[in-house]
Image: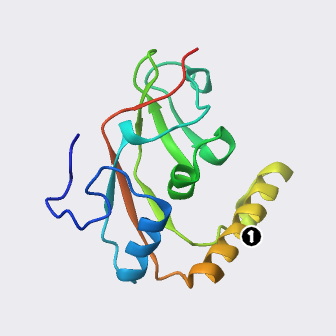
Amino acid sequence: MIICSNNPDRPDADGFVTKEEGIGWAKENPGEDIPLFNDAQNLDLGRTHVNDFDSPGDTKDINLLYKGTPKDVFYAYGSVSMTLVNSAGQVSIGKDKFDWDYHDVSKAHGFTSKAKEVARNAGILKERTLHNLNDNHGFTLFTYGLGQIRKD
């Protein structure tokens, strides 16, 4: 396991940032983008499958909420850019913002996309209210190594 910090007090010291750790980090560092790091091999990517990609090397935005991932994974990533590395199901995961910013629903195309954005924004409002968060809270989440998705 790669540890991106020699500080055991950082929430990413074990290679996995939970929902609660991410919220705590954002609240401890408002207005600052101090990144955290996840090890991709620690992520349960749910029902994400090699068939979601055209071929190795293909990159797609995958919405993890609809892939049955655990709350700590979809909460951190939501929709994330993944690249299928090989047909064995290894993927690399792009950096993402761990934040509570609202999305502009008017930029969504089609009824289904607009409905998903409205639902997302409702969830963001709930989390902002519940945890006293705003636009000043958030950070970049980098993911190192390779994750595993389903191939059968």
Q: Is residue 14 left or right of residue 75?
A: left
Q: Position of residue 78 (x, y in %)?
A: 58, 53
Query: Which sits in the foreground, 150 or 7?
Result: 7
- Dividing the picture into quarters, in which one does residue 148 lie? top left
At 59% from the left edge and 41% from the top edge, which residue is drawn? 62
Taking the spot 65% from the left edge, 48% from the top edge, the residue there is 65
Q: How is the image coloured?
A: rainbow
- Count of numbered tags: 1
Question: Outermost residue toward the left?
Answer: 6
- Above or below for 108 versus 127: above
Horizontal side of 64 relative to 22 (left or right) equals right
Task: Tell me the quadrant of the picture where the C terminus can be found.
Answer: top right
Q: Mark 1, residues whose alpha carbon is within 10 Å: few (<14), some, or many (≥20)?
A: few
Q: Say which amino acid is labelled 1.
A: Ala
Residue 137, image x and y in percent?
A: 46, 78
**Above or below, 24 relative to 50:** below
Question: Viewed as shown, does residue 7 lie left or right of 127?
Answer: left
Which residue is rendered at x = 46% and y = 83% of the image? Answer: 136
In this figure, which residue is indicated by the disc labeled 1?
Answer: 122
Q: Secondary structure at mark 1?
A: helix
Picture coordinates of residue 128, whole percent (x, y): 61, 79
Q: Quadrant of residue 140?
A: bottom left
| Quadrant the N terminus occupies | top left
Residue shown at the point (41%, 18%) measured from the top left: 86
Within the image, what quadrant is residue 119 found in? bottom right
Q: Position of residue 41 (x, y in %)?
A: 37, 36
